[in-house]
Image (cartoon, rainbow, N blue to C red):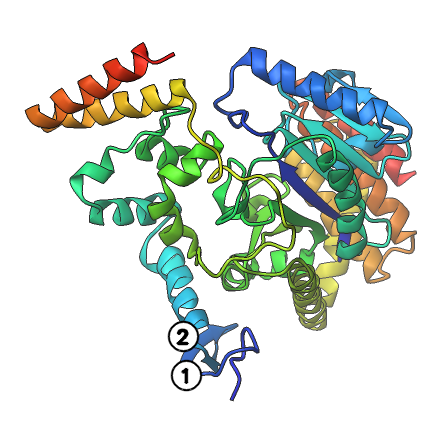
Amino acid sequence: MKCERCGEKEAEISVKTITNGRIKTMKMCTNCAEKYAHIDEISRGKSSFEDYAKAIIEELPESKKKLICPRCGRNYLEFIKTQRLGCPFCYIKFSEILKKLIRFNLKETTNEINYPYSIEDMEYSKEEKILKLREKLKTYLDFEDVEMIKKTLLELRKLKEKK
Amino acid sequence: MIIGTQSIIYRNIFPYKFPNCETEKNLTEIKEKTQEIILSKKIIKKPKIIKDPNGIKDELIIRFLDLDLREIKKHSILISESIEETAVGLNISEHISCISKSESNSPLESYEMTKRIIDELSKHLIFSYSKNFGFLGSDPSLVPNQTEIIFLMHTPGIYHTNSSAEIKENLKFLGAEIKGINEDILCSFGFIYVFVKPEPNEKIDDFIKRAKKLAQIIEEKEIKTSEDYLKKNKLKFEDTVWKSYGILKYSKAISYDEFVSLSSRLIWGISNKTIIADYNKTMEKIIKTIKFFKRKKNEKTKILLAKKAKELMD
C-alpha cells in the first residue's frame, strides 16, 4: 500500500490522527511519519519554534553552541529569537541546526533550476578568512586552548601579511 | 470564501547580507541596482514607483499588497504595474519580493505572473543560491523555493462557532499557517490569511496543488459550519445581521474592531441572502476600508470610519 500522504513510497507505519474530533488512521511511509512527529512535537509538546530550536541546540556539543556567522556576526541565540538568518553564509554556518529544524534532507535535494553559482562554490575572500579565524580564536580563548590560540594567531599573521 | 489569492517569490542578491543585517549604504545600492534593471529592461511594463507608504493614495494597491503585513521601510520601494496586478518590493523583508494577485483566485496563475518577473531579473542579477538549500533568504522555512502563497478568506461560520483554533491546529500538519487579519486569529472576526509555505523537496507544481487543496478544505469546512449554524440559530443570525447593518448605517463613531466585526456579520448575511446586495462589490469595498483604516487608529478615525460605513450602507 502506498503512503497516504506522499503517495509515492510504500506505507510502513500507521499513524492515528484526530481531526474534528474524529480518529483517523493514516498509513504513512517512514519519512512522512517522521515529519508528522516533528510537527506534532512543535505544535503540542513544545510550545513554540523557540523552545524547539533551544532543545536542538541543547543537544549540540559546547563548541558548536558558540558558533557565529563570520560574515554577518549572527549567532544561534539571535537566530532563535528572530527566526531570521542574516546572510547567505549563515546557511553554511548553521546547517546542522537548520537541517534538524526544517527536516531538510540535504543530499536528496534537487532544484529544478540548474543555477551556475552557489555559495558552496565560492572561495572565501581574505577578509572573510580573517573573520573566520578571529571567530575560531574567540572560541579557543573561551576554552583556554593555548596551543590552538598560538596556531590561529600564527595563521592570522600569515594571512594579513599575504598580499 | 476566498477573497484574494497572492503568490510571493523572494530573492536575495549575492553576496549581500539579507536586509535585516545589511548596511544602509548597501541596501540603497541594491535598491538602485535592481530598480534600474526593472526600469531599463522594461521588466514591468508600466511602472509606478512608490517610495513612501503615506503617499499611497490608491486603495487598490493597499488592498492587493497588504501593506499591513509588509510595511515599506526606510530603504524600501515598490514598483507596481499600473494595472495593479503585480508589484516588486525592494528591501522589504528580502532584497526582492515579487508579488502577484490573480483575478480568478488561481494560485497557479498568480505564481506564473510572479515567476515571469523573477526569471527576467535572474538574467541580470545573481541570486543567493545554495546547491543544498536552494534559494536563500532570511526566513529558512521558505527553502528551497522562497515562495509563499497567501489566501485572504472570509470564514464567519468557522469564527462564530469557535472552530478557528481547531482549524489552525489541523492545518499545521498540512503545512499551512492561519493568521487573523489583525494577526491574532481569535480576534479575526472571520477574516483570515492562510499562508502556505513550500515543504522541503516539494516540487513547485505539487506545492501549488497543495495550496489550492488547502484553500478548498477551509472553504468546504466554512460552508458546512455555516449551514449547521444557520439551521440551529436562524432567528439569532438574522437578528445580528440586521443589527450590524443598522449600527453601520446610523452610528456616529465606530472603533476599528467594531467595524471589522459588524461588517463580517453583514457580509455573512449577504452571502446567505438575509440581505440582498452584491456580495463581491460589498466585500471589495469593506476589505479596502478595513485595510485602509488599519494603519490609522485614533479617535478621529472612529468618526471617519462611521462616515465611511454609512457611505457603504447607502
Q: Kindly identify the residue that appears in the image at 36 percent across and 40 percent down.
A: A94
Horizontal arrangement in the rendering, residue A36 relative to residue B163 (left or right): left
Badge 1 element: loop
| Above or below: residue B41 compared with residue A100 | above
Q: Quadrant of residue B314?
A: top right
Horizontal arrangement in the rendering, residue B99 relative to residue B71 (left or right): right
Can the viewer see residue A144? Answer: no
* Amino acid type, label 1: Glu
Q: Kindly identify the residue that appears in the image at 75 percent across and 41 percent down.
A: B119
Quadrant in which the C terminus of chain A appears:
top left
Q: Position of residue B215 (x, y in %)?
A: 68, 61
- Tell me, for residue A12, which label it has, or none: 1
Earlier-in-chain disc, 1 versus 2: 1
> Is residue B251 or residue B288 the one in the foreground?
B288
> Is residue A110 or residue B237 the one in the foreground?
A110
Badge 2 element: helix
| Above or below: residue B163 compared with residue A97 | below
Q: Quadrant of residue A33?
A: bottom left
